[in-house]
């Protein structure tokens, strides 16, 4: 079992709020970025002080649009991370970026301060779909960003895509996947659109202005994607994620294997030694809480920005390990690793659920690993529900 920590840093700024987005992010507040970076460095010191020489195997800047920070601002954050944590020499260090926010020089700068992976929010290659999503970039921006990233020395790139969009057809989706995979990024993520309450998409759908996505079409798009990306040499290793051999996202694997990660920044979530916690959402409140409070009385892994925390019961840790681990379509959950971690076998705890799900052809044993069948991948949420509750 991987005992290293992962660190997630949340950057809650965007130039424009996309119509489907329900992340903790704010448009038009970029003037607060310098104070926010300063606060983030405070929080790194608060938490790092309690956890000196903790080994860190992955670092991930997510958002929001982290690529709105300057190279110097990242340099300042890395200097704090390196002072307070033992960042391993081969650590995976990722940045989420909007293709409309990067330039050749900026990407070279990111590489020079230590980033070795970029995850681009591409979403679609179709101009109408990009407009409907209110993305600020075009597909030409994506191609430029990809080319400049390679020139800067990035050999580990991800493209995020969305299917199941209103008015998207099987053909426009296929065209997007063909164009994107034709660039040969190391990793591709494809998520089905969910209409979140409170977003413009959610409101328009409630009023009937936006056609609801067709679930049958979304299922066809997903099935086609599984077949097509396999034929292009991509291995599906998670319900929504494909990679070239050896290029799984190490940071996200830490989540799916239900292992320790620190969450830093406004609205960030963390999970350390069975404690789940989350930070205050609002940018200004976060800055105030982190910069005006001292370390006194803080207990690892919480900083003064934390507003919620919960110590999991052993049963909750086992349930969450099943919920996240079953997302791993190839690896699933190893009974040996589970037993080493929890001192009991999977079937002793979840025998009834697993027997039933196998009889419905939704789960299968492969060696000591329990995992989703191909049919189970289409009905993942119904499988996961069986592991929640008493
Ligand atoms: S760029 Fe990403 S985080 Fe920002 S509003 Fe759009 S979807 Fe949300």
Image (cartoon, grey):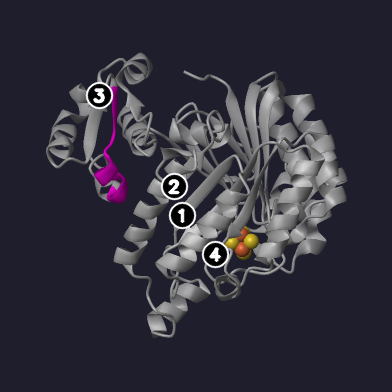
Label 4's element? loop
Indicate which disc, 2 or 4, sits on the residue closer to the N terminus.
4
Few, some or many residues within 10 Å of mark 4 (<14, 14–19, 20+)? some
Question: In the rendered view, would you say 97 is above or below 197?
Answer: above
Q: Tell me the CA gap for discs 1 and 3.
A: 29 Å
Q: Tell me the CA gap for discs 1 and 4.
A: 13 Å
Identify the residue under disc 1: 191
Indicate which disc, 1 or 2, sits on the residue closer to the N terminus.
1
Indicate which disc, 1 or 4, sits on the residue closer to the N terminus.
4
Front position among marks 3 and 2: 2
Identify the residue under disc 3: 346
Location of residue 374 by image quarter = top left
Confirm or deny contact between disc 1 and disc 2 (CB under 8 A). Answer: yes
Looking at the image, which residue is at 80% across and 46% down? 107
Q: Tell me the CA gap for discs 4 and 3.
A: 37 Å
Between 295 and 248, the one nearer to me in the picture: 248
Indicate which disc, 3 or 2, sits on the residue closer to the N terminus.
2
Few, some or many residues within 10 Å of mark 2 (<14, 14–19, 20+)? some
Between 244 and 54, the one nearer to me in the picture: 244
User: Is residue 376 a member of the stretch shown in magenta?
Assistant: yes
Q: Tell me the CA gap for discs 2 and 4.
A: 18 Å
């Amino acid at each position: 079992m991987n005992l290293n920590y992962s660190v997630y840093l949340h950057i809650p700024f965007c130039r424009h709020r996309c119509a489907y987005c329900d992340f903790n992010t704010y448009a038009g507040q970029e003037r607060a970025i310098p104070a926010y970076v300063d606060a983030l460095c405070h929080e790194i010191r608060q938490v790092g002080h309690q956890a000196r020489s903790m080994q860190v195997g992955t670092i991930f800047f997510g958002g929001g649009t982290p690529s709105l920070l300057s190279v110097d601002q990242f340099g300042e954050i890395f200097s704090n991370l390196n002072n307070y944590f033992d960042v391993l020499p081969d650590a995976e260090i990722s940045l989420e970026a909007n293709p409309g926010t990067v330039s050749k020089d900026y990407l070279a700068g990111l590489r020079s301060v230590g980033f070795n992976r970029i995850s681009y929010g591409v979403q679609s290659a179709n101009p109408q779909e990009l407009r409907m999503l209110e993305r600020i970039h075009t597909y030409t921006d994506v191609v430029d960003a990809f080319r400049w990233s390679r020139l800067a020395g990035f050999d580990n790139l991800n493209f995020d895509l969305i299917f199941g969009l209103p008015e998207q057809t099987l053909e426009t989706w296929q065209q997007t996947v063909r164009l994107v995979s034709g660039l040969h990024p190391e990793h591709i993520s494809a998520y089905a659109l969910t209409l979140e309450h409170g977003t413009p998409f959610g409101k328009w759908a409630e009023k009937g202005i936006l056609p609801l996505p067709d679930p049958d079409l979304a299922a066809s798009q997903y099935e086609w994607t599984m077949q097509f990306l396999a034929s292009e040499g991509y291995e599906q290793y998670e319900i929504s994620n494909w990679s070239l051999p050896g290029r799984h996202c190490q940071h996200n694997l830490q989540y799916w294997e239900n292992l320790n990660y620190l969450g830093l920044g406004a609205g960030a979530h963390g999970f350390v030694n069975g404690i789940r916690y989350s930070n205050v959402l609002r940018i200004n409140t976060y800055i105030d809480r982190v910069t005006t409070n001292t370390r006194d009385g803080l207990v690892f892994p919480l900083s003064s920005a934390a507003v919620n925390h919960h110590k999991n019961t052993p049963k909750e840790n086992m349930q969450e390990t099943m919920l996240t681990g079953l997302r791993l379509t190839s690896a699933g959950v190893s009974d040996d690793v589970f037993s080493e971690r929890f001192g009991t076998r999977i079937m002793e705890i979840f025998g009834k659920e697993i027997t039933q799900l196998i009889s419905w052809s939704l789960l299968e044993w492969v060696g000591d690993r329990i995992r989703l069948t191909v049919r189970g991948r289409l009905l993942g949420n119904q499988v996961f529900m069986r592991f929640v509750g008493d």
